[in-house]
Image: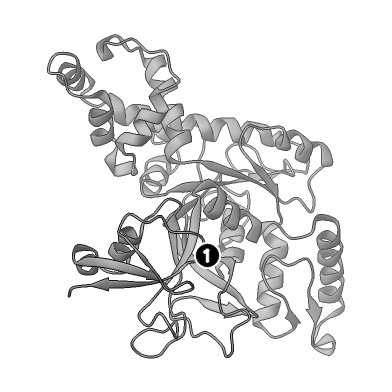
Amino acid sequence: MEIGVVGKPNVGKSTFFSASTLAKAEIASYPFTTIEANRGVAYVRAECPCKGMEGDCSPKHSKCVDGIRYIPVELIDVAGLVPDAHQGKGLGNKFLDDLSAADALIHIVDASGATDLEGNPGNVGDNDPMDEVQFLRDEIALWIRDIIKRDWNKMTRHVDLEGLKVEKALAERLSGLKVNEYDVHAALRHLDLDEKTAKWSDEDLLTLSRSIRKVSKPIMIVANKADIAPAENIEALNGLEDPVIPASGEYELALRKATDAGLIAYNPGEDGFEILKTEELSTAQLHALERIAAFLKEGGTTGVQNVIEQVVFEFLDRIVVYPVEDEHKYTDKDGNVLPDAFLMPRGSTAKDLAFKVHTEIGEHFIRAINARTQRIMGGDHELEDGDIVKIVAHV
């Protein structure tokens, strides 16, 4: 799973990315600070089955803190997008290519209105953040349309004259964007397009592209810099069709760095923190923490962790499943308790999990066992959130 962090230059994308992952990304107040895409690992939280068990779990690829499992997801922070990016303006071509594999997009918007559409800094309230939302939607739709239009006449002949399904033709054309036939079918379902694809106009293709984007690359809008944003800007953004979460990437980054330095105790997504070493903090740092504490008291969180989790669990509708080799002790062959936590699409079956563990195990699947109930599950048994599963395979 890959989640793209997008937005125009200088809105706090790299700060949000660094706050989410603690990966190093160049941060500065000028356009196109990010040239090469930054990749890092963020975490989503789920209640770990070890809660209430005797002893601790021993995760291999995630971590568990007080019975809360932190499960990794990949984030990619791409170069800033400006108007006409689909035509190559700015770093547009690179930006869009870097987004090809993303399953969902987090759109970082400067809710303070302190940067223009080109990413040039100004004063709070100088610009309307609503403009950022519209132009990014437009650029991605235009990018998809331009891909569809390549050899368009040839494709329409295959569809209209040779009977090729339009869903299949478009899915093949857009396969590099992780668009499949189901996505295209869902996008076409509510559109009133001519039966003959050769009659589809540029505007029809743009409408289709917007619909495909909604299905295949849903967007979560982050009203960033909410700590300094005018209230009316946040209110306006909250009225949008796409979900909006107010956030302060800068505050989250400060909290995570202070935690990493051992100065405070803070778990991402929580509504407060504890200062551990007051004597090592300067007056300026203490005042900064006071401002952050006030922000948390008013909003509940910095918003950063909430964004990641809503994208994974709501947009992408993932559940958490724990594969084990010993269904009685919940361990792998090395004795690690609850070693893995997999994020699976809701509706996944036991056999889907087997393929996720290893292709060979999926190909030689025999049955699965629900470790909680000790009941046998067939290959088409639909998994539930929090299931602990042993896969039996002939390998």
Q: Is residue 69 left or right of residue 124?
A: left
Q: Is residue 304 left or right of residue 362?
A: right
User: To which quarter of the image does residue 123 belong?
Assistant: top right
Quick one: 188 or 307, which is closer to the camera?
188
Amino acid, disc 1: Ala
User: To which quarter of the image does residue 219 belong?
Assistant: top right
Q: Quadrant for the N terminus, please.
A: bottom left
Quick one: 313 or 4, which is closer to the camera?
313
The residue sitting at 85% across, 56% down in the picture is 298
**Mark 1 lies on residue:** 25
- Percent across and percent down for residue 338 are 46, 80
Looking at the image, residue 269 lies above or below residue 277 = above
The residue sitting at 19% across, 22% down in the picture is 155
Mark 1, other Cα within 10 Å: few <14 / some 14–19 / many ≥20: many
Quick one: 78 or 40, which is closer to the camera?
40
The residue sitting at 28% across, 41% down in the picture is 175
- Percent across and percent down for residue 37 are 43, 57
User: Could you tell me if residue 23 is visible in this image?
Assistant: no
Q: Is residue 329 left or right of residue 162?
A: right
The residue sitting at 30% across, 27% down in the picture is 148
Query: What's the coloring here?
Result: one colour
